[in-house]
Structures are given as C-alpha cells and as structure tokens.
Image (cartoon, rainbow, N blue to C red):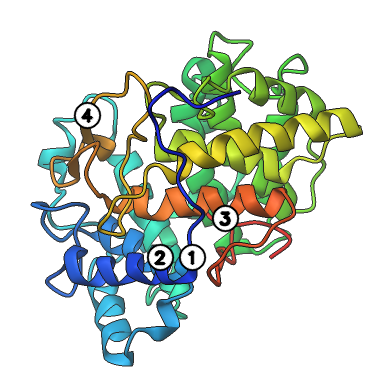
Amino acid sequence: MKLPAKLEVPSPETHADMQATAEFLEREMECEGGFRFAAGCPKTLLATCFGVISHEMLGTLPELQAARREQLVDVIASCQQADGTFRDPLHPDKLIHTLRKFTPTYLSWQETYFASHALDALGVAPAKPLRFIEPFRFEPTLMPWLGTLGFEDFWFVSNYLMFLLHFLVEVEGKESPAAHRVLDWLDTRQDPKTGFWGTQQGASLFNGLAGAFHLYGFYQYLGREIHYVDRAIESTLSVQQKSGLWSEPGGGPCEDLDAVDVLLKLVPSNADLDERVKAALRRALAALRAARLPSGGYCWTSPQRRARPRNVVYSGLPTLKVKSNKEDLWSIWFRPLAIAMAELRLGGKPAWPVKFRGKPLLGWHPAL
C-alpha cells in the first residue's frame, strides 16, 4: 500500500538523530528542574515523568549528570501525599472537578502511575507506601468497583484497570491475588469474536483495540494466557488506515503505539497471519517516522494526506496543551517507542540503544 502522494518517505533514524532528540528534551522541554509538556506549558508532574521515561527509552537517562537525575527525583517525590498518591499542585480538585470525563480518581491514579514508573526508571522507590490501594486488595471492595465500569467506552475504562493492576503488582508482587482476580474477571468478559473487550457492549473495534492494549502486557507479565490471539490480531489489522497508521487523519502517538504494541506482543498461530502483521508494520514505519520534526522532537499528528493541525489537550488538562503539528513530550516518548517496537517485530534492531520499561505496561516488552 503506497503512502499518499507528495509525501517524502522518511529515512530511518540514526543514533545521532536520537541523541538530538535527547538534547532537544533537555534544551527545549526542561522547565524549573522538571519538564513541560510543550512550548508555552508550565512544569507539571506528568510532563516530568514523560521526560524521564523518554530519556530512558532513548537510552540517555544514564548520561544525565547525577545532579540532574537527583533534581528530577526531587521534583517527582515532592508531589507524593500521605496516602501514597502523587498529586500535581497545578491540578487541584477545583480544576479536576471542571473536567467532563476525567474524574479526581482518574487524575490522581494517572499521576501516581506515571510517578511510580518515572521513579523506577531513576532507580528510586516512592518514599511512602501506596496505602490508598489497600481497599482494592480485597473482594468486598474490588469486585463491586469492577462492576461499575462501563465497557461501552473500553478505551477509557481500561486506563483505570491499567492503573489498578500496576498498583496491585507494586504492592503485592507478581503473585498478587488481587491482580489475578482482576484478570479472572476480565477472562469472563473478553469478546471471542474480536479478542478485545467492550465490543460486545457497543465499543467500536478501534476502541476495543486501544483498551486491550492496556491489558495484554499484564497478562504476559503475570504469566497468564491471552485468549483469542489470532482474532485480536485480525481485528487490529482490520482497522489499519491507508496511511499505515491506526487513526485518521495523521494518527496519534497513543493510537498508533497501541496497535504496534499489540502486533509485537501477540504471536500469530500461522505463517500467513505472521506475514500480514509484518506487512502492516512495514506500512506503518514511514508514517510513524514522518512525525519527526527538524528540531529532533516528534509531533502528535503525522503529516499525512488530509491531516490538519488541531489543538490537543492531554487528559483535558489546560497545563498540557499543544498544537498537533508541534513537539510534545507524549509524542517524543511514544513515536520513537512505536518505531523501535515495529523494527523489533520485523527482526531488525533500532539504531539507538533503546531501553524498554522494566515493568508493565506503557513501554514494556517481555523479551527485553
């Protein structure tokens, strides 16, 4: 399948290119000792975490001076509350209550999830235990709470499950009874026709794909069987767009990584399906690479036919805003990560010393 007319096919990244990306991070995205999401944004906890994990993925985190790493630890650690959650002082309840979709629990868990991962990348454990998760370790709280989740928008709901599973594994380890209880519950709700969740309750195939991405890694990390693998792969391939991306126009860093990660993690049962997976990833690579800007940063929207710049507000937060054709930290993490994963699945090796996350889910791969 050809790329849209008049688009230049980007060259593969070099090691020097990715060093330039790391330098861009420190030069343009550093802010008051942490990181900002994009030009014009303030320092935030989320952006600081994205910056740390971007450095890790680029293989440049060890190259930062010790004082700089300690500075990043201090910025993140200063946001931890007595109950173990991490909260950005720029995102008080008063602001969060104005958001339509993102609840205080969602934002609190999201900031805590990324803070936990960023500290882990820096080789530091949170100073306070994650006491807030204690009630969810036990059936009388966990099971009724799971029953409140509406699967018709599984992409959104699966984020809660991703956060929860991470916290449970952090507190209880790989043998976490509560985490396995969640996966037992999910096993009974998986759609055998699509391999996803939510598609039996009205979620679109793409919505189911984006949600399933948040779970498959936990199944692998915890040694659980993933059911309906071939159906999930077929479903993923069926929603790929003509550009090679998975969301139009121009894709998105999360949407495209979701699909690439699924196609990397799930192993087809036959050679024909395996070859179709590889063909899909070959088509994706050029469009993924097109999101790289001359600065060394990456943008949200790949410059494909009909793609137009738009305003992106991450999680509805006004402190994390960007024009989709400009550099942002989510794209700087996710765009190269998707490229590295696609190359790995195709039997290649990224040009830079890519380092995947050591814990699930975002940025983690079981073989590395």
Residue 14 percent location from the top left of the image? 48, 65
Badge 3 element: helix
Q: Residue at x 34, y 84 (%)?
A: 64
**Gap in angstroms between the C-alphas marked 4 and 1:** 27 Å
Confirm or deny contact between disc 2 and disc 4 (CB under 8 A): no
Q: Residue at x 63, y 23 (%)?
A: 197
Residue highlighted by disc 2 = 17
Residue type at the position of mark 2: Asp
Q: Marks 4 and 3: in contact by CB < 8 Å?
A: no
- Lower position in the chain sequence, tag 3 or tag 1: 1
Tag 1's secondary structure?
A: loop
Looking at numbered disc 1 in the image, what kind of residue is underneath it? Thr
Please give the label number shown on residue 340.
3
- Going from N to C along the chain, the mark reached first, 2 or 4, is 2
Q: Secondary structure at mark 4?
A: loop
Q: Which residue is mark 1?
A: 14
CA separation, marks 2 and 4? 24 Å
- Amino acid at the residue labelled 4: Pro
Q: Which residue is mark 4?
A: 309
Q: Residue at x 25, y 60 (%)?
A: 45
For the residues labelled 3 and 4, the Cα–Cα distance comes to 25 Å
For label 1, the crowd category at 10 Å Cα-Cα, with few meaning under 14, some 14 to 19 and many 20 or more, is: few
Residue 108 lies left or right of residue 97; in this view the side is right
Q: Earlier in the sequence, mark 2 or mark 3?
A: 2
Identify the image quadrant of residue 297.
bottom left
Query: Is residue 98 placed above or below 173 in the rendered structure?
Result: above
